[in-house]
Each structure stands twice: as structure tokens, then as C-alpha cells.
Amino acid sequence: MNAHSTSDSSEAYIALGANLGDREDTLMEALRRLDEFPDITVLHCSNIYETEPVGYVDQPLFLNMAVRVRTSLNPYGLLHVMQQIEKELGRVRHIRWGPRTVDLDLIWMEGQKEDTEELILPHPRMEERMFVLAPLKDIVPADESSGLRTVVMAAVERLDGKEGLQLWKTCSWRSVSAPSGN
Ligand SMILES: Nc1ncnc2c1ncn2[C@@H]1O[C@H](COP(=O)(O)OP(=O)(O)OP(=O)(O)O)[C@@H](O)[C@H]1O
Ligand SMILES: Nc1nc2c(c(=O)[nH]1)N=C(CO)CN2
């Protein structure tokens, strides 16, 4: 066990976006790196959506998706792994909400609330973003016990049709570390 891991494991939801380079390839590589990390198993991945940029609009279309993972890392440990993957895959921060090879946002973690400079959980803008909600809707189980399903369904109903997005592809990625594959 390292400084960031616990003896228990919990489920977490990560949203991914990419709008530079080979977007699909980069997303799949980010999934592979998450899943290969010893304390993280990717359990389920959403469809991939092509979405119009939100916030800073003068930039290419995004591909967005989300994954459900099981991890023994605490939220900060998981965030650091995600940031390392962003860095390895060439993300450079220039413009707030601007173009990026890949972005990984920690959206929700079972039983965890954080409000520090480094990490806010649940993600503070998740309920405003169809590019986060549509993928989450694909993968949050109906019986999810920490309340995420209710939050997602209510927000989708509020926002429906307000953000341009279309189905790009079903996700063909398969976990190498999940016990029964994915
Ligand atoms: N739940 C979270 N997931 C990811 N980063 C977070 C979260 N809460 C706070 N942060 C902090 O936000 C900072 C900026 O993150 P990032 O550059 O990915 O923002 P962004 O993707 O451009 O915009 P947004 O935060 O609106 O998605 C990071 O340094 C990180 O420490
Ligand atoms: N469509 C879309 N727009 C965005 C995205 C994104 O992933 N998809 N990410 C942003 C910053 O997190 C800002 N705007």
C-alpha cells in the first residue's frame, strides 16, 4: 500500500475529453494507462460522443466519454494518476476551457466529498455539461447506491437538447485487469 492507497476500494467516475490530434486513439490510450495502473481497474466505459465545445467555443469538436473504475486509491491519489496520464499524453495548459489532447476530470467518488484548491468532489460543473452527463447516463447503474444516478437523470432532464452532441461510436475498448473483462 502507498501513501495514497487505502485497504478498502471504491468506485469512481472519470470523464474524458479530447479535441486535438487523433482523438479516439488518445482516449483509448488514456483508458489503457488507467487500467494498467496497479490500484485501478476500469469496470465499464460509456459510448463515445462528438460534442460542440462549451465555454471557449472557437476550437475543434471534442470526443467525450466516461468510465467507471474501482480503485484502492484515495481521491487525491486517483487525481494524481489522471494528471500524470494527461501529461504523458501531451496535454499542455494554455487557455482555460481551451483545446487539449486529453482531459481527465474526476466527477464522482463513492462516499467522498472534497472542497480544496486541488480537488472539488463531486465535480462542480458536472450538472451543467451534457458532454459529461450523456456518457455518465450510459454507465451509472440503476441501483448505484451513492445517489449519482438521481443527480445525473435530473440534470439530463433539465439540460436536454441544450448542448450539441451526437453519438460517435460505441466503445470497443476491453479491460485487461477487470476479472471478467469488460
Ligand atoms: N474534480 C476534479 N477533477 C479534476 N480536476 C479538478 C477537480 N477539482 C479541482 N480540480 C483542479 O482543477 C484544476 C484545473 O483542471 P483542468 O485544467 O483539467 O480544468 P479544465 O478541464 O480546463 O476545466 P474544468 O475544471 O471546468 O473541467 C486542476 O489543477 C485540478 O487540481
Ligand atoms: N464539448 C466539450 N467542451 C468542453 C470540454 C469538453 O470535454 N467537451 N471541456 C472543457 C473543459 O473541461 C471545456 N469545454
Image: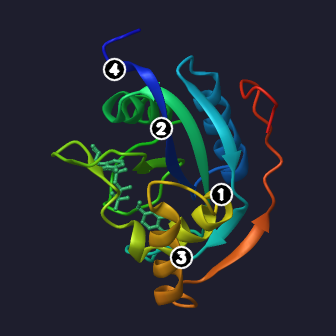
Which residue bears the numbered disc 2? 86
> Going 36% across and 45% down the picture, which residue do you hit?
111
Residue flagged by tag 1: what amino acid is it?
Ile
Q: Is residue 48 above or below residue 100?
A: below
Q: CA distance from mark 4 to mark 2?
A: 19 Å
Q: How many residues crowd around disc 1 within 10 Å: few (fewer than 14), some, or many (20 or more)?
A: some
Report if residue 88 is visible in the image: no
Which residue bears the numbered disc 4? 4
Q: How many residues crowd around disc 2 within 10 Å: few (fewer than 14), some, or many (20 or more)?
A: some
Which residue bears the numbered disc 3? 153
SS under mark 2: helix
User: Which is nearer the N-term, disc 1 or disc 4?
Assistant: 4
Name the quadrant of the N terminus.
Answer: top left
User: Which is nearer the N-term, disc 3 or disc 1?
Assistant: 1
Q: Colour mode?
A: rainbow
Q: Is residue 83 left or right of residue 168?
A: left
